[in-house]
Image (cartoon, rainbow, N blue to C red):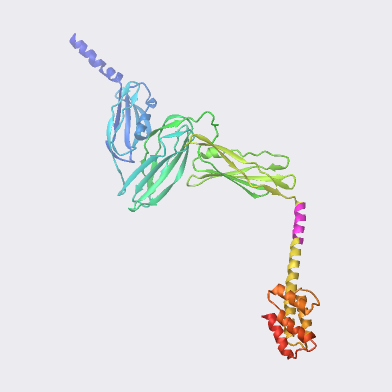
Amino acid sequence: MVKILTIVILFLMPLLSYADGMLRLITDKTQVELGTPVQATIIASNINTSISLIDISHLKNNFGLEIVESSNKLDDNNAIQELRINLYPRQPGSTQIESVQLGKYKSMPIDLVVNPAHVIGSNVTFESSYSAVSAWQRQQIRITSSVITTSKFARIELSDFNQEGIDTYKLKPTKKILSDGRYKITATWVLYPLFDGNQLFTPPSVNYWLSGKIQRKFFPPVKRLNIKKLPSYIPPLMPVGTLNVSSQLISSQHWHIALSSTDISPSTLSTLAIPLNNNTNIKFGNVESTTKLNDNFNNTVSIEIPLSYSRSGLYDLPELVYKTFNPHTGKIVTLRRKTDNAIFINDWLKVILSLLAAYLVYSVLSTSISYATNAINRYKNKKQILESLLHAQNPNELHSLLNKYAEIMRWGKNLSLNQWGEIWSRYENTSANDIIDELSLACYAKNRLHLEQNKLNKKVYDFITT
């Protein structure tokens, strides 16, 4: 009886082996450099559930995860399913590859030591930081990653941040030389969470390039952020952040508007409307807009608006009014921009104004030329009279020359000597009494002064020219 039972048990052992399920996790190493993968294989033996259904998302908390391939095979009557994955540690030090579970079967965890990165004779340091641990919906969050290396020709490249419910952008990497001669290469993901709640941000790889290939894949740490729900009174398209608005009238028929921001989502900025309402006197043409995003993430939307008018006049363009949500104060901010008035002149009126302007210019030029000509002639005549004073033949001729001088200076005509002296004193602020008295005696006194004519001429000349 015992022999028969033993034979039955031996006969059923293969079937029992086939029926017993087992889940194992094995790795090619237990010590690895940061940026290099641990090649891990999940082996499901005699488990009816497909290994494609296994949940290994929790491994992303400590590792960057790449699925390599899955396979099925039959080995000694055992159904074997395998899933090969690459695990990139997110930070150096001691860590653990957590157990995985498929149905009721569970693997054992594996301890792992992660050493700092060393690439082609150079120590490579990886750093990463989040700009915030709490934010509003649609508020900007930046994940900045840097690699410090001695390799001059190294560069980094960000993988695409494909996570549901997050609007993502990448900034172009920058490089600077540190005081110790090493190079710091920095790149940034700019993220906008669209939904509220506690969200787990799982950044993809930062690829370290050298010698024409990816030498290391660094993964920033996973972080759970508190994304606050916007107040119910905030419209779905209201920008969250700081908005800059400029408005300029390039010409009476060309209106230029620029909307810019470094923290508002480009997709939100491009949807902002311009308040254009045609009226009976001013009409707006087809609006053309272009979007530019520079290396510093200064997003600018340039808007060009053609203008036309029904008649000449002074026109008020619409005031630009935008409302934004300030994430730092939790309040709505109203931004207003007033544009200079537009002056429009019809073509026929332009012709008339041009003719008037030409006539005005002509009149000014003619007057100026006439004034300049008279001034030149007056200067020449004045000079001629002064020269004639030195050659006068008698006192009466001197009086006549002084009258000509008065005419040139526009003081009057046929002035007596006393009148001439008074006018001289008024305009020149010097007394002419002495020279007038002497000249009057020479001209009209019964006992005329017997002065040499040349001396009298010189005396009058010196008085006027001094």
* Nearer to me, 417 or 104: 417
Q: Tell me which residue sits at (69%, 74%) in the image.
A: 428
Residue 356 pos. (x, y %): 76, 58
As displayed, is residue 258 above or below residue 368?
A: above
Residue 155 can be seen in this image: no
* Nearer to me, 232 or 215: 232
Residue 324 pos. (x, y %): 54, 37
For residue 378, what is the image quadrant?
bottom right
* Nearer to me, 148 or 344: 344
User: Is residue 246 covered in magenta?
Assistant: no
> What are the residue bounds of the magenta stretch?
348-359
Quadrant where the N terminus sits is top left
Quadrant where the C terminus sits is bottom right
Please, which residue is most extreme toward the left here? 2
Q: Tell me which residue sits at (73%, 47%) in the image.
A: 313
Q: Tell me which residue sits at (36%, 45%) in the image.
A: 147
Residue 89 pos. (x, y %): 33, 37
Magenta span: predominant SS is helix
Residue 37 pos. (x, y %): 33, 38
As displayed, is residue 137 above or below residue 126?
A: above
For residue 393, what is the image quadrant?
bottom right
Q: Tell me which residue sits at (33%, 27%) in the image.
A: 100
Please, which residue is most extreme toward the front here? 447
**Left or right: 339 as drawn, with respect to 241:** right
